[in-house]
Structures are given as structure tokens and as C-alpha cells.
Image (cartoon, rainbow, N blue to C red):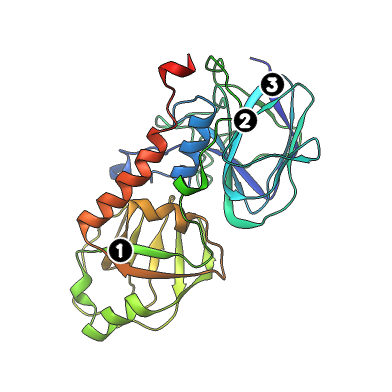
Amino acid sequence: MSALLVVEDPGLHTTIQDLGRPGHRLGGVPPSGAMDRFAIAAANLLVGNPEGAAALECALTGPSLVARAHVLVATTGADFEPHVNGEPVPTWTGVLLAAGDELSFKGRRAGARAYVAVAGGLAADHWLGSAATYALVGRGGFHGRALKRRDQLEAAGPAPRPSIAGRTLPETKRPRYSPEPLLGVVGGPHLKRLSASSRKTFYKERWAVSRESDRMGYRLEGAQLEIKGADLISFGLAMGCIQVPNNGQPILLMADHQTAGGYPVVGAVCRADLPLAAQLLPGDHLRFEDVSLEAAQERWRRLRAALDGLRPTDADS
């Protein structure tokens, strides 16, 4: 298949991602995939793809891409000010590129990671059933690495028909991104290992995302929490888990997290709020709020309904 897009400028760190590779934690392989799973799913649905199709994750700056053929694209997640041939185009909306058109990004206005999906999805190296780039071992995505200038991106398959530009996800149905989000947390199995005063501090503190943060996890800086109890045998972990090591500074696990560990897990961020965490940068702040399992499930149902509303209907045929 011939090139669909040519990379003129890769941006700071642009990789191919999808919804990850679940089911391999036992072998020590994390799910990886997009940090903001809602944004990549929405981008794919806006161009008619299955929500798990391979797309671009662009960190901090966007790439410059030149179309070699007509293609429907959508950008979601962080607002990096997308432009086509120097003219601004809306985010969270399907936009048709003609051959020779250039999609570029003027600069970051908000958020950390933007997503670019193309109709038909992107061709990629698959590893353990996923196209997600896992840079630590150089597998998946585009030869297991970030994009470089002159890389040529191909479509994974034919574009879905009909190809409909202009479909959009209203702002009211998107995650409420913020440089200081309030993240709902369901209590974890080791919450009681925090002293009573530290439990109160955990929810009241304004935590800063430290410089020692990446796709594996965010180290948070703030008041020192008092954690007690005997050492734990390592156990399985998931994205969103909040560990508290002996230094009393929490760690929020993200897409490339280790699959097992022995630090106490005092809570887990609600699935519906993980997109908010995914858009944070070192120096940003966050707070936690205690929510029930039922409330966390309801938040996700509302967000899931927004994605379901993007699925093609008979009227689109």
C-alpha cells in the first residue's frame, strides 16, 4: 500500500498507539497504548474507524504531515492548534485533506497529548496483538520508535464508507480537561495502611506532578504521607493505581506501568478521570476526591455514552 502521509516534522515525540495490549501482565508486559484512551477512541470514531484502530499520539508538540492522497483525519485530546495549509481547523472534528495538503500544529494551548486518527487506521508493526509503541523494548508502532522526518505512513486498510467530514464531538461531551483536575479515587486494598491524618492529607493535598514522571507513572510531590505495615509480596497492578512507597510520596501509574510491585496501593483513579490525568505535565497539579465504586461506574457510563454516540447510524449510510 502506498504512503498516505509523509512526515515533514515529527514534533517532539510522536508515536503510533492504540488501546493497548491487555492480557500479558503475567509475562511482564504492560498494556501500554494511548495515555488518553478516550481521546484516541473518539478520534477514530470521528473518522469512521473502530475505536481501537492505530493512530498517532503527539506529546507536547504536534507533527507536520503532508497528505499523499485524499484522507479524512481528526485531532482530539490536547489543543495544539491544528492547521491545514496554514488555516486553523477545529479539534474533535473530522476534516478532509486533499493530496498535497499539510496538517500542522501551531503550538500547545492546553494539555499534554494530542491524537491524530486517519480513516482506515494506520499501518503498524503489531506485537502481542497490538500496534501500540512500547519504546522500552522497541516493539510495536513504527518500528518500535517515535516518528522521524521523512517517515511515510500507510493506511492499515481502506477508509470506511461513506467518508463523512464535519462530524464532531461537542465540548459538553468531552472530558473536562484542566491543568489542575480533581480526580475521583476509589479506595484501594491498602488504604488503611495510611494513618488517619495521612488519609485526610491524601484527599486535601494539592499534589504536584514531578519532573520524574513519564508514561510509566507520575511521581507526585506534596505533604509526606505516613505509611505503615509489614512489607508486601509483589502483586498485580493496573493503570490508575496509586502507590505510596516508603518516602510517603504517591506514584500514579500510567500506560507503561510495571505489571507487579510491592508498594501499598491506597487507591485507584476512576476510569472516567484517567483522561484528565493523561493530559498533565510535570509542574501541573492535581487533587484527589474520595468516590464510591457506584459513583465511579456512573461517571464512566456517562463518558462511554459520548463515545457510543459517535458510532455510525443507518442515517450515515
Q: Amino acid at mark 1?
A: Val
- When the figure is inspected, residue 140 is found, relative to residue 177, above or below; the finding is above
Quarter of the image where one finds residue 220: bottom left
Which is nearer the N-term, disc 2 or disc 3?
3
Which is nearer the N-term, disc 2 or disc 1?
2
Q: Amino acid at mark 3?
A: Ala
Residue 79, x across and y down, in percent? 62, 50
Q: Decide which of 1, 300 is in the foreground and name it.
A: 300
Which is nearer the N-term, disc 3 or disc 1?
3
Residue located at (37% from left, 45% from top): 303
Residue 216 visible, this angle = no
Return the mark for residue 73. Answer: 2
Residue 308, x across and y down, in percent? 38, 33
Q: Report if the CB atoms under discs 2 and 3 are less than 8 Å apart.
A: no
Q: Amino acid at mark 2?
A: Val
Among all residues in the image, which is located at the extreme bottom? 197
Q: Decide which of 182, 230 is in the foreground and name it.
A: 182
- Helix, strand or loop at label 3? It is strand
- When the figure is inspected, residue 79 is found, relative to residue 313, above or below; the finding is below
- Say few, some or many: other residues with alpha carbon within 10 Å of mark 1 (under 14 / 14 to 19 / 20 or more): many
Residue underneath mark 1: 185
Residue underneath mark 3: 3
- Say few, some or many: other residues with alpha carbon within 10 Å of mark 2 (under 14 / 14 to 19 / 20 or more): many
Residue located at (40% from left, 33% from top): 309
Would residue 39 be found to the left or right of residue 94 on screen? Answer: left
